Amino acid sequence: MADPLNDYIDAVAKVLGLPVEAAWKPTISANLAVTLKMARSVEEFALPDETEPASIYAA
């Protein structure tokens, strides 16, 4: 079964003019899958409408 992200990888590589070897695609696909999973969890986190961004960030 083909990885559905391969078409995306090919399209983005073409637009950006990046050479992508076939051997790299599984690693790129795995990275994108993790990134999409993290983005989904951020997107699903409900915030009230009155939430404001923090003005100061401290670690």
Image (spheres, grey):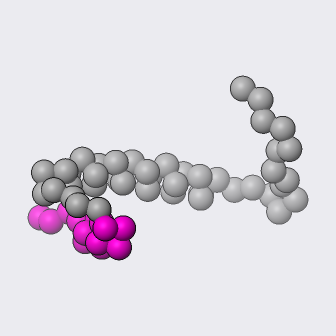
Residue at 13% over, 57% down: 22
Identify the image quadrant of the N terminus.
bottom left
Q: Is residue 54 left or right of residue 37?
A: right
Q: Which image quarter is the C terminus in?
A: top right
Viewer-nearest residue: 58 or 34: 58
Which residue occupies the extreme front position in the image? 17
User: Is 8 inside the magenta-drawn segment?
Assistant: yes
Left or right, residue 33 beside residue 35: left
Estimate the x, y position of residue 6 in percent, counting from the top left.
23, 65
Residues drawn in magenta? 1-17
Q: Is residue 7 left or right of residue 58?
A: left
Q: Is residue 13 above or below residue 25?
A: below
Residue 23 visible: yes
Q: Is residue 8 visible?
A: no
Magenta: main secondary structure equals helix
Residue at x 64%, y 53% (from the top left corner): 45
